[in-house]
Amino acid sequence: MTWEDGVKNFFSTYFAARRMWPIAYILGSPYSPLRAELEMPPKNWRDAFEDLLALENGRDMIREDIRKAEDDFTARKRVDVASFAIAKCNRDLIENEKLEARYRARREEAVKHKDHRIAQSITDDLLPYVKSMSERRIAYAGEVKAHYERYKDWTASRRRMRGRWIASLVDSGALPGWKWGMHNSIHGPIMAFKKRDSSPETEANIRFSELEMQHVFEEGQAHSFGSPALLPTRAIKALTNNTHTPKCQNLPNDPLQKFEPSKSSIVYQEGECDLVKMPDGSTGPAVKIRNVMVDGTIESKTFAQDPEGLFDETQGATDSMHRVHQAVKNYVGRSPRTSEASRKDFRGDESQEVRLDNGK
């Protein structure tokens, strides 16, 4: 038996265990909503599956006003981010025009004083450089607009990354008995799921990176054992100011998120949900969020009947971990003291992965 066949056999057996329902179904079934949305994208498979889980667990389907509040909030946020990015491009273009005017004036002065070396340098180097900067900003603004148009009709659930969406099932109360954790690794955010108050016979836990989910669902790769190594805290401290954004904000694949607010000091976030009685007499989810900061402090928050606040808190941490991961990755690639093994880790071509101890 090959290693790949062994991995497939292990996961097919592990996913078939009742204690792994429904996360194993979401990750491994050919009928998973995460597969259905790729094959039949017009339908909102994520929300439909969440409603089925809620009904299975004796709850009502997720209220339309809660879904609408999330959708409206994310739509407004998307517009704000796109507008900010394009406005930044316009400001850069104005500055480039001023810079070009200064260079042209300097060239005229150089010609007047017969300083042909300076004049030629401005003609050959500086003016083309300014032009290329402007062209890049125009191209980037076009990319932002195209990105916004492509995803503007997506619901809040569809905007979430796959692991983050599974965590939202816990937050809505559709996945009782589970809790989630999110931390950063050399492959970006890792999602960890574990049964609450479980015995050795019913214990269930699983971890995976968002990058692995992309490989599994979009590229047809098999699930892998273990978890990639965590980002070193010292590197996160060196590249962030502990409270705001990292020095490098490049975020691949999503130009709109480049200018999102950041929670870069969060190195680990976990959440669990309890059903409580709401002020109107109904029963609803109260989500407890625990943030572990880069300086070791712990921040606890509770969200009840606040879908906007909960989405902002969890999605902000997710986006921030992507930015911090990219900043550390860029640092590793630039630093002359970085070993080749570390660079290979970030390129994803290391054959051995490091298993996490306890997800915290």
Image: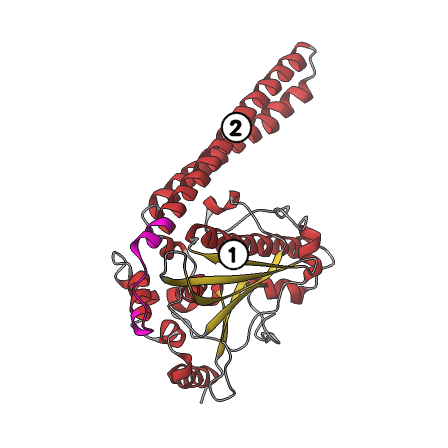
Q: Residue at x 67, y 18 (%)?
A: 116
Q: Position of residue 152 (x, y in %)?
A: 34, 45
Q: Quadrant of residue 297?
A: bottom right
Which type of secondary structure does the marked residue at label 1 adopt?
Answer: helix
Can residue 112 be seen in this snapshot?
yes
In what quadrant of the picture does the C terminus appear? bottom right
**67 to the left or right of 103:** left
Which type of secondary structure does the marked residue at label 2 adopt?
Answer: helix
Q: How many residues crowd mark 1 within 10 Å: few (<14), some (14–19), many (20+)?
A: many
Q: Residue at x 29, y 69 (%)?
A: 52
Q: Position of residue 208 (x, y in %)?
A: 49, 70
Q: Residue at x 67, y 58 (%)?
A: 294
| Label 2 vs label 1, nearer the camera | 1
Front residue (pair 275, 115): 275
Say if the magenta span includes residue 35: no
- Answer above or below: position of 58 versus 39: below
Q: Position of residue 32 (x, y in %)?
A: 32, 70
Three-letter amino acid code of the residue under disc 1: Thr
Check residue 243 in the rendering and tell me which mark sits there, or answer none: none
Q: Quadrant of residue 311?
A: bottom left
In what quadrant of the picture does the N terminus appear? bottom left
Q: Position of residue 318 (x, y in %)?
A: 51, 56
For the record, the magenta segment spans 55-69
Can residue 38 be seen in this snapshot?
no
Say if the magenta span includes residue 57: yes
Front residue (pair 102, 354): 354
